[in-house]
Image (tube, rainbow, N blue to C red):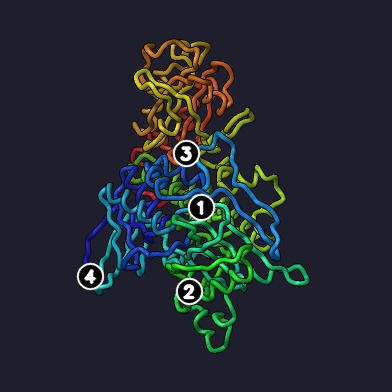
């Protein structure tokens, strides 16, 4: 066994969640290793729905262009019941949302993220499995084995488990994983068809029995390619594992030995005739399936951990929460888990975090996980997203994960009562920002891209020191002092402000059409300071800002002395 090896963070699991965690850690300057027990990336289009909020996160991380060039748009869903069309649901969002819904096979999501990670000098260590770990006040001692039989002892400061529904990290922490399983079994298939249903629309076709209960179902999601779909449907009796002679294949051994019946079950593989039989029963048009790329049987459970970490060890994604795939919430929720955790750990590793910053991961993300599990279970049992009692506009924003927020978080300012986005809310995008040299307008996301925490100052530079409001220079100095230089500062000037030549100590963008002021509900030329976190949420909103209030917020994130030394020898998550 190799001894004495060490790094800052070990990420276990190289699915979309683990890769996101590793990429964000590297992007924020932290050292990490990422391991996966499988020898290679799986060629399965498992999680395929990409939400607009995930695309915003990818934009901030510099991934979105590559994703948009591979993905296909999801425009809506057609719903049929007993052969009759019940409605066409368009996935419509407000015009200020920069991205729509998309479909991208999971293997492409993993490939793009892994390629970005490699550009930061980190490769996935495949065929490498975490077998045990022990943590203390200073770090975590992990034990790894490789397919070759070699073993390694690795010392890390933090351990992040993104290792799925049967997580070794979750089990090692002894976290509760309460919930249940749905009795139905399903099969997945990646096929092409020859129908002429509208391009970009998914299909949900149900059959109801005499009592009005669903006894047959078909769900199809478009994939890149010509009339290619990932289809899910009930398992036919001849493939069902409830038969006595096959009982062992659906027991704990088939699902990680822990009784968590969730995910793909590779011992039974449906064929093209199995999929065709369902299409013959439920497709709204006669069609022939072909080009079967892969298929599998899968089960669905709904569970969530009692806490998202303990000490220096954390879980994210399916290791923390599993639920029905209704609305494509799982992978996207996990990606947000990873992004939320990674920037906080990166600050802690740099000695620039308050004592409570890593612990805020649980405070912010576990309520989100609980809401997603509850909502997807309701939708799965009540007939889909269309059964939601909320208005269609709210439903669409929630499914897009644009309503996720952290009001009340210990590292976010109180929201206050004014209009517009408040602390803890998503920072909306806007257009129409111009600079003194470029002749084209930019978006706010262009300004924020590939940055960490950003202080946005709104107001004319020439009058920012009037009426007791701190000047640009004072606010910039306070931001850099309290964060140890880890806050970028940019200014947005109203359209009627003095010309760009006014000397100010930060980059300035003109709000040419007033879109920034509109989206953030800033009236007139009132000075305002906004702190935008690395994950794209507002940490603070200060009308008529002063250095005291700005400093108080930054201390909650970066520590009372800019975080220097605060994270070096303290275990996080338990105080």
The 10 Å Cα crowd at callout 3, few under 14, some 14 to 19, many 20 or more, is many
Give the quadrant of residue 510: top left
Provide the residue designation for mark 3.
536
Mark 4–mark 2 CB contact (< 8 Å): no
Q: Nearer the viewer, mark 1 or mark 2?
A: 2
Provide the residue designation for mark 1.
333
Mark 3–mark 1 CB contact (< 8 Å): no
Mark 3–mark 2 CB contact (< 8 Å): no
Q: Nearer the viewer, mark 3 or mark 2?
A: 2
Secondary structure of the residue carrying tag 3 is loop
- Mark 1 or mark 2: whose residue is earlier in sequence: 2
Q: Nearer the viewer, mark 1 or mark 4?
A: 1
- For the residues labelled 4 and 2, the Cα–Cα distance comes to 33 Å
Q: Is residue 569 visible?
A: yes
- Mark 1 or mark 4: whose residue is earlier in sequence: 4
Mark 1–mark 2 CB contact (< 8 Å): no
Q: Is residue 137 visible?
A: no
In this view, the residue in front, 570 or 203, is 203
In this view, the residue in front, 390 or 73, is 73
């Amino acid at each position: 066994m190799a001894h004495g090896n060490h790094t800052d963070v070990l990420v276990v699991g190289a699915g979309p969640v683990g890769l996101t965690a590793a990429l964000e850690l590297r992007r924020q300057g932290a050292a990490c290793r990422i391991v996966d027990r499988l020898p290679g990336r799986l060629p399965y289009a498992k999680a395929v729905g990409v939400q607009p909020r995930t695309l915003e996160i990818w934009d901030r991380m510099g991934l979105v262009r590559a994703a948009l060039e591979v993905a296909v748009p999801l425009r809506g869903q057609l719903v049929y019941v007993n052969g009759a069309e019940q409605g066409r649901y368009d996935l419509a969002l407000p015009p200020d949302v920069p991205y729509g819904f998309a479909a991208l096979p999971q293997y492409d999501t993993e490939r793009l993220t892994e390629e970005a990670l490699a550009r930061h000098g980190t490769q996935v260590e495949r065929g490498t499995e975490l077998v045990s770990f022990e943590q203390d006040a200073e770090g975590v001692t992990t034990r790894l084995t490789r397919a070759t039989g070699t073993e390694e002892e690795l010392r890390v400061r933090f351990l992040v488990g993104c290792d799925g529904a049967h997580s070794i990290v979750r089990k090692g922490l002894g976290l509760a994983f309460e919930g249940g399983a749905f009795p139905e079994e399903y099969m997945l298939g990646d096929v092409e068809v020859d129908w002429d249903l509208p391009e970009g629309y998914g299909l949900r076709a149900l059959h109801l029995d005499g009592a009005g209960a669903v006894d047959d179902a078909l769900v199809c999601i478009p994939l890149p390619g010509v009339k290619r779909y990932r289809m899910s449907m009930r398992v036919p009796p001849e493939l069902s594992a409830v038969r006595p002679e096959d009982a062992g294949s659906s027991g704990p051994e088939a699902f990680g030995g822990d009784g968590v019946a969730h995910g793909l079950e590779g011992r039974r593989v449906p064929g093209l005739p199995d999929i065709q039989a369902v299409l013959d029963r439920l497709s709204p048009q006669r069609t022939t399936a072909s080009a079967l790329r892969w298929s599998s049987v899968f089960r669905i459970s709904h569970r969530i951990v009692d806490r998202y970490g303990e000490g220096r060890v954390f879980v994210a994604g399916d290791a923390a929460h599993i639920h029905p795939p209704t609305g494509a919430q799982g992978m996207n929720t996990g990606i947000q888990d990873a992004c939320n955790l990674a920037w906080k750990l990166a600050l802690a590793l740099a000695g620039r975090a308050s004592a409570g910053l890593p612990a805020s991961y649980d405070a912010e993300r576990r309520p989100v996980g609980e809401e997603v599990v509850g909502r997807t279970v309701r939708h799965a049992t009540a007939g889909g997203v269309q059964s939601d009692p909320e208005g269609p506009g709210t439903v669409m924003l929630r499914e897009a994960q644009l309503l996720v927020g952290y009001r009340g978080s210990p590292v976010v300012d109180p929201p206050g009562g004014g209009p517009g986005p408040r602390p803890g809310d998503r920072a909306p995008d806007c257009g129409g920002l111009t600079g003194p040299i470029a002749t084209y307008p930019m978006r706010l996301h262009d300004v924020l891209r590939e940055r960490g925490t950003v202080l946005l100052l709104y107001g004319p530079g020439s009058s920012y020191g009037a009426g007791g409001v701190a000047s640009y220079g004072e606010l910039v100095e306070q931001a850099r002092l309290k964060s140890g230089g880890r806050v970028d500062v940019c200014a947005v000037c109203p359209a009627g402000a003095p010309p760009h030549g006014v000397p100010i100590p930060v980059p300035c963008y003109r709000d040419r059409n007033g879109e920034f002021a509109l989206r953030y509900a800033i009236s007139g030329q009132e000075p305002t300071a906004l702190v935008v976190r690395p994950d794209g949420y507002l940490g603070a909103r200060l009308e008529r800002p002063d250095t005291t209030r700005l400093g108080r917020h930054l201390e909650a994130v970066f520590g009372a002395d800019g975080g220097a030394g605060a994270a070096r020898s303290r275990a996080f998550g338990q105080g």
